[in-house]
Every structure is written in structure tokens, then in C-alpha cells.
Amino acid sequence: MSHKPTITDSLQFSADSKLPTYLFGAGLAGLILSAIGYFTNTDQFFFSYLVSFTFFTGIAVASVFMVLFHHITKSKWGVVFRRIPETIGANLWIWTIFVLPVILGIHNLYHWSHEDAVATDHILQAKSAYLNTPFFIVRQFIYFAIWGFVGRKLYKASVDLEKTGDWGITSLMRKISAPAIPLFAFSLTFAGFDWLMSLDPHWFSTMFGVYYFAISFQAFWAVMILMAYFLHSQGYLKNTIVQAHIYDLGAWLFAFTVFYAYIAFSQFLLIYYANLPEETLWFYDRLEGGFQYIAYGMLLFRFALPFLVLLNREQKHRKNVLIFVAVVVVVMHFLELYWIAMPTMHPEEAHGLHFSWMDLTTFIGLGGIFFGLFFRQFKKNSMIPENDPKLDACLEKTYHH
Amino acid sequence: MSKYEYVPEPALVKGNHSFSSITELVTDVNLRPTPKAWYLAMLPANALLMLLLASIGYLIWQGTGIWGLNNPVGWGWAIINFVWWVGIGHAGTLISAILFLFRQDWRTAINRFAEAMTIFAVMCAGIFPAIHVGRIWVIYWVFPVPNQMAMWPNFNSPLLWDVFAVSTYFTVSLLFWYVGLIPDLATLRDKASDKIRQVAYGLFSLGWTGSNRHWWNYEKAYMILAGLATPLVLSVHTIVSFDFAVSMIPGWHTTIFPPYFVAGAIFSGFAMVLTLMLVAREIFGMKDIMTDDHMEKMNIVILVTGSMVGFAYMMEFFIAWYSGVEYEKAIFLLRATGPYAWAYWTMMTCNVVSPQVFWFKKLRTNVKFTFAISIVVNIGMWFERFVITVTSLANDYLPSSWDYYSPTIWDVLTYVGTFGLFFTMFLLFLRFLPMIAIAELKAVMPIADPHNYDEETKEYIAPKTEGSNTHSETV
């Protein structure tokens, strides 16, 4: 037999770790505080909630996407990371309950849900076969059924493979992944239409689903970098996830920075150039009232900064640089979703850009629960998919200067 | 036992090949006397090339009136053929640059071949924008050349961006191709027995000796060119899509156009590579290198990109309805049910339905079937450009100006003629240049992998992949 790379780290996240408890505590505190906001400013509560909800859900769906691509391309590079997105995907079915506030807030969020508004607006009438409350609710459950089922199934397959050492399970993973890719493409697209595009029900863009995919995926890579370094900081997997692996995450973050910029800019340019009133107003609303500063910030910090920094090979090997860029991207992802959603709530006519404490509390609330669920599940099994046929090849990656 | 079967990675090169047998196999095509069959193939290719030149000559003499353009359809086969050929010209650089960056070793069997195809396809594409201007003798006006009239091209126009995008793409693709060829040209130089070849290959191999330093520079240059070529693959078809999408014509102005055009381009490019590859490997006996596994991987790429195109069609249709804009709705209904419905459904069948057969392993590993689908796909992609260009123009905002567009014989002959150019170039390539990247291919063969030795005992260990070979003695 050829030499087998040996793993020197413990692969088990400490079972006594109090981390999930703390995270759940922070999450509950955030949600309870936000609930107070519900009584003081209901509209603000729902809009803040929607931004945080689309933030975490987008990243969760991108996680499963990554697992799907990984199986379907038979990739080796990311086997040591794969358990992280797999675990996020395993919790997606639980995440269904967090779409309920969006459904409950439908009247506060979505102008098209008001029957009197539709009655006087012939454009909304034309869309009412799609934009109506019952169908909206049904769609939410379809999306989460797909995501939750596939996420759970792939997690289970991975754990089974680890426990039994049966490499045949990789065929099962591919059999699930192939049809799941088109299902995810359509469900994420329509979720993007529902949650974000229909906030301005007159506006439309064929690119919007791809755009939501692109921003979520870019943020996902940043989250992965932060997760890897977080595990290192806790003393985990220091000799298993090495710099050569994290370098690949940096390269992916770079690639998706370009992809994001490509998609976002194409969408903007085509609408700006044609200058048709039914389309261009959406950008008009987002380039005034203080929101323009977020837009300039996106250009500088979500594209230019990560692009220029990560273009350099050496920088992708530097821990502090990667953490800095990843944090900037995550913050910008939140701000971009804010920039998409909030001009509906705070248009320029109503004082424009206006941050609320609920933006923070809903974020902490959902974030705490999201990562609480993650670590609760993460400590149940090994942190890397042991016995995976590609694991040895992945572990053999070494630092190339 | 498991109810699922584990499928190990297949070996990239089949058969019992050593380094030298690969060199022999590939260079023999270039070094042996020209076979009669080559002349026989050159004959129709050259005839078509002459047809192209005659059609262009007549066009320049007579003007674009010989084409089927009418009012309101001012863009016809010329733009359709341009976009079609440029789209085909996307696969080569995608395979060589993007798959290189993604460390996809299987690309080594087809990259040289696909890059050559790319360059020739872009040549064919470039003809159409040039000849369609009417007064070709002032074609240099498309470039921002300072002149005494202070007349500049319109920098706001994507048509001008196209001039830069396509010429940059062509230049970088050519350089990339050439850089990759240098080590192999040196191999041919060393193997050539007559003076003429020695000098010709020697000249272009730039004094390559295979020294460590040469390889070091080569790898660096290759990496940089791959990095430069990657955004170009995306930008060319993005800007081609802008030609349509920046306008306010219903059916053209839609934001998903850029990625959708790029996906379509890769789709048709891979299909064309397959069409050529399946024939070439048969004639030249390269089945050990261009294996059925390569074909299967390419079929999966075709399935993925074909489905992406299908996704874009559905988004367009959905958003046309969802927008509530009556012109958008009308044009999409007209596409499916109007005077060009035959073209629309041809496109739908060929592009969206036909690649779905590759969900089945039996079909995507079937050579004859794949060959048929690869042609069907390119028919579909031609019709896609036809549908986009013609339907949106023929039925514009003003129903009184609607007219049906039909091509003339000159449209057809010019298009058919471009195949003459394409195949003439391709045959020249097959005859004089190595169709496989020999040096790159060797690097992915199991015998190039030092892991085959046990570190302690220094004993040879056979790799675990299927079709493994025992070549310890040849290394």
C-alpha cells in the first residue's frame, strides 16, 4: 500500500463545549429584544428581520450548493472542509420555522399582498397569479422542503460513509446531487424573487435569481474562511486543515468576488443603459437618500478591495489578510441585502437611509440560532468526513510557495 | 456489501503507453508523408473557401442589398453567423484556461485541439462584422484612429466594445495556443528528418531545449496567460450579449443575457469540439488519449450548459409575463406561436430537450449518439441566434411595419463558405501541428507520478486507477 497521510488532530468537537448553549442564549436574547421592536415599530421589525433572514438563508443554501458541486465534480480540494457546509445543510429543515415571520409580516413587507392596492393597480393585477398570499406561502414550504430534504440527505450519506467506510455511498451522493442542482437553481431564484425582488412589485430583472445566488455564494466563502480560522483558534484541526487548504478558500473567494461583480454590474449596466422607467427606478431609489453610499461601498469594499488583495498569491497565504477580507465581505453582504430591501421601507421621501437597533438584534437573534444549531450538530460527528475516498488526496495538499 | 458501487477515477490515458509511444503516436501524424485522404478532404474544404471568397467579392462589389435584409429586419444572417462562430470559439480557451485553473487534468487530451478550433472559429466570426459594413474599404473607421475629420467611433456602443473584445480574445487565444505549442514544436524539430521541417519547427520552437529554466519560465507564462484568458472567455460573449441587451427592443433587453450568452457559447463550443474530436480520434487512432471517459465528461458539460441555457429561456419567459409589460409579453408569445414558431421550437428541441438525454450514462457514453447530439446542439444554437435576432426585429413596436424575413442565396452561400475557411485551417493544423499537447499529456500519465514509489522500500506500486499500467521499467 502507498503511504497514507496520518491525521494527528482530534477530529471530535468537544462534546462538553458550551458554545451551542451560549449561541442559543445570544440568539434568543436577540429575538426577544426584536420581539419588543415588533410592538414598537412593526414595519421596521419585519424589514430588519427580512434582511437578516435572507442573509443567513442565502448562505445556508449556498452551503448545500457547494456540497452538491463538490460531489458532482468529484472534487478533492475541499474534503477537509466539507463537513462544515454539510452540517449547515443538515439544519436547513429546522430553519423552515424562521420563514414564518416573513409569512406573518407579508402585509408589512409586500405591497402586492394588499388587495385594495392590487385593485387599483393594473400591473399588480397582471402579476396576481404569481404574487398572491396563498401561493406565496405554498412556495415557501416548497423551497424549504427541497433544501431541507437534500441538505439532510447529503449529511446523512456523508455520516454513513464515515461510519461504514463504504465508498459506494459516493455514488448515492452523486445521484442525489445531480437532480438537486436544477431544483436548487430554480428554488433559490424564485425565493430571491419572492423575498427581495417583490418588495418592489413593479420591478423585474431576469438576472435577480443569479444575483442572489452570486452575493450569497461570495459571502459563503468568506464565512468558510472565518469558520476554518475559528476552529484553529479553538485548537481544532490545526494539522488537518492547513494553509494549503485555506489558500483554496481564498482563491474561491476571489473567483466569486469577480463573479459577483460581473453579475451585479451586468444587471446594473443593462438597466442603466436602456433607462426604461419600469426598470431604472429601482436603481434610482437605491442611489439616493443615503443609500448611494452603500452602493459606492459595495463597489469599493465588496469588489475592489477583495479583488486587489486576493489577486496576489502571497496575500492568500496570510491569515490576518484573509480574515480581514472575509469580515469585510460578510459585512458588505449584510449591507447589500439592506440596500436591496430597505429603500422600500425608508425611501428618500421618508428621510432615506436610517439604521435601526432592530437591524442588529434580528441579526444577532438569527445568527445566534443559526450557529447554535450548527455547533450543536457539528459536535455530534467527526469534523471531517473520515473514510472519504478523496480524503487522502486532500490531506496530501502541501504548502506551495 | 454496499448497494451502491464505487466508481474509481478512470485513467486519463488508456492502453499500455510509455512516454515515447505517446510522442510517436502524436508526432507520426505530422512527420509521415501526407496521406491521400488529406488531399481528398482538402478538396471540398478549399472549394467552400473559394465560395466564401466569391460571395464576399460579390458582396463588396454589389453591396449588402444582395442579402435578405429588409425593413424592419436590418440584422440578419451576418450577426447570427458572427455570434454563432464566436460562441463556438469559446470552448478552446475555456478548456485551456479555466479548466487549467481548476486543475482539471483531463483537459490535456483535448486542449490543443480545442484551442485550434477556437482560433479558426473566431476567424470565421470576425469576417461577418467586417463585411457587413457596406464600405469595407473604410473598415478601419471602427478603430479609434486619429483623423483629420475628428471623427471617432461611438464609445458608448457595445458594437465598438466588440471590436476590442473579439480582437483581444483572438490575440490572447493565439498567444496561449502558441506558448503551449513551443515544447511540442521542439519535439517535432528534434524528430524531423528533413531540413525544411527542422528549420521551420526550429524557428517556431524558439530554441527550446527543455532545460529546467525553460520549463520554469514556460509554466509561469502559461499560468499568467491562463489568468488573462479566463476573464476574456467571459467578456467576449458578455459584450456580444450587450450588442442586443443594452437596447430597448423587447426580447433583447433582459438582464440575464450576459451569463446566458456565455453558457450558450460554452455549450456550442463543447459540441463542436466533440464533433471534431470523435472524427479525428477515429481517423488518427487516438482513442487511447481522447477516451470515452473524456467524451462522457464533455457530455456532462453539455448537459450542464444546455440546462443553464434552458434556465435562461424559462427566466425570460417568466419575467416577460411577470413584468406586465405588454410588448415583452407579446414578443415572447410571438416567438412561440408566431411566424417564426418553427425556428423557436427547433431551438427549444435542440438546445434544451436534446442535451437532457445525457442524464443517462448509457447515452452519454455512446459514441454515435453523442456525435449526433453534438451536431444537433450546434443547429440549435444557430437557431437561438436566429430567433433572438429576427423575431424581435420582424415584429417591432409598430405592427404596420412588420415584415417576414427570408435569407437570399448569398446569405446561405457566405455562411456555408465559412465552413470552407474553418475546415481548411483545421486540416492544415492537423497536418502540420501536433493535435495533442504532448508535454502536458505526459505530465498527467500515471508514470509521471512519483507517488508510485514506496518511500521506504523504493519499490514500484501500481496506481489504483482502472487501466493502470506497469511502466516502472520505462521511467
Image (cartoon, coloured by chain):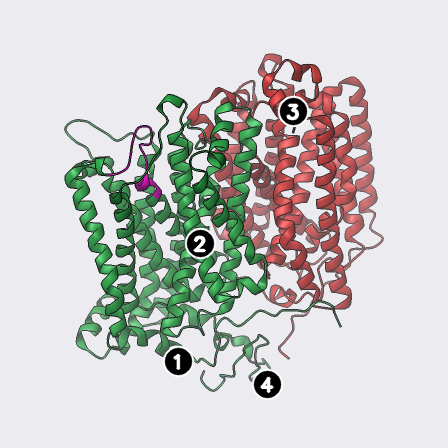
Chain colours: A red, B green
Q: Give SS at disc 1.
A: helix
Q: Residue B427: percent from the left, percent from the top?
A: 28, 64
Mark 2 and mark 3 residues within 8 Å of each other at the beta carbon:
no
**Which residue has dot 2 on it?**
B376
Q: Which residue is at the front of the view, B340 or A97?
A: B340
* SS type, badge 2: helix
Q: Which residue is tagged 3?
A: A128
Q: Would you say the residues marked 1 and 2 are in contact, meaning their CB atoms lie under 8 Å apart? A: no
Q: Secondary structure at mark 4?
A: loop
**Pointers 4 and 1 in contact (C-beta within 8 Å):** no
Magenta stretch in the rendered image: B67-80
Nearest to the eye among marks 4 and 3: give it.
3
**Mark 1 vs mark 2, CA separation in Å:** 36 Å
- Cα separation between marks 4 and 1: 29 Å
Give left or right: position of A45 versus B277: right
Q: Secondary structure at mark 3?
A: loop
Quadrant occupied by the C terminus of chain B: bottom left
Neighbour tally class for label 4: few under 14, some 14-19, many 20 plus, Cα within 10 Å:
few
Count neighbours of disc 2 (C-alpha within 10 A) and say few if under 14, some if 14 to 19, many if 20 or more. many
Q: CA distance from mark 4 to mark 3?
A: 74 Å
Mark 4 vs mark 1: which is more N-terminal?
Answer: 1
Return the x and y of residue B159 as percentages of the image width and height.
Answer: 32, 35
Chain letter, disc 2 residue: B
Picture disc at residue B359: none
Foreground pick, B24 / B264 = B264
Mark whose residue sits in front, 1 or 2: 2
Q: Amino acid at mark 4?
A: Thr
Find disc 1 in the rendering and name its residue. B21
